[in-house]
Amino acid sequence: MRAPRSVSLALVVLLAGSGCLPTRNSTPAVAAPTAESEWPNVHTRAMNDASESRISAADRALADFAQRYPGSPEAAEVPYWRALIKLDPNNATSLRESITSFESYLANAPAGTHRMEAGAFRRLGLALEQRNAAIAAMPAVSVVRPEDKAREEELQRLRDELSQANAELARIKRRLTRPRP
C-alpha cells in the first residue's frame, strides 16, 4: 500500500522543520566586556576606594583598566583620575608624582574630557610645590605669643617674691641664732 502524497509531504516537512529548532544544550552568547561597558564599574570602585583612603587599591584598579583596554577613550582618562587621587592631601604620595601625571594626561589626551580641570590642578600643584619649598627654606623663628609673654612675666614676678621671702627667712634665722647679750 502506498501512502498518499500529502502524508509523505507532511512527513518531509516535519523532519526538515525539526532541524531548525534550537537544541536545549545551546548556551546563550555572552558579550565580551569592552572598555565602554567596564569603565563605569571600575571608575565607581576606584572613587569609592579613594574616598575610603584605600589609595593604592584605587590606583591599581585604574592602572589595570588602562592595561586591559589600551587606546580606548576611557583608558585615555585614567591618568587624569590617577593624578587627581594622588593630589589628595590625605594621600601620602608625593605632590610631584601627581603633577607629572597631570602633565602626562595633558600631553597624551589632546581631546581629553578633563583637559581644563587637569590644567588647573597642575597649576595648583605647582603653586603648592613652590609654597612648600618656600616654607622649607624659611629659617626657624621662635614665635612669642602675648599669652606666653604674660606667663613669663608672672613667673618672673613669683620668682622675685620667692627670692625676697627666702632672704627674709634667712635674715630671721640669723637673728634667732645670734646669742642674746
Image (spheres, rainbow, N blue to C red):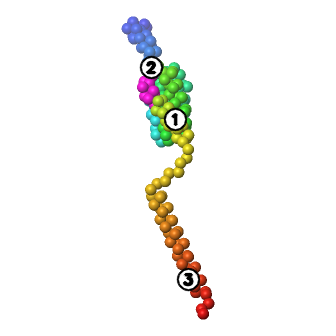
**Most prominent secondary structure in the magenta stretch?**
helix
Q: Quadrant of the C terminus?
A: bottom right
- Residue located beneath label 1 in the image: 129
Query: Which callout, 3 or 1, points at the residue further toward the start of the chain?
Result: 1
Contact between marks 1 and 2 (CB within 8 A): the answer is: no
**Kind of residue sitting beneath label 2:** Ala
Q: Secondary structure at mark 3?
A: helix
- Residue located beneath label 3 in the image: 172
Q: Secondary structure at mark 2?
A: loop
**Kind of residue sitting beneath label 3:** Ile
Q: Quadrant of the N terminus?
A: top left
Residue 41 image position (x, y, % from top left): 46, 31
Residue drawn at x 55%, y 83% is 172
Count neighbours of disc 2 (C-alpha within 10 A) and say few if under 14, some if 14 to 19, many if 20 or more. few
- Closer to the camera, 20 or 80? 80
CA gap, disc 2 to disc 3? 93 Å
| In magenta stretch: residue 136 | no
Kindly identify which numbered label has been placed on residue 111.
2
Which of pointers 1 and 2 indicates the residue nearer the eye?
1
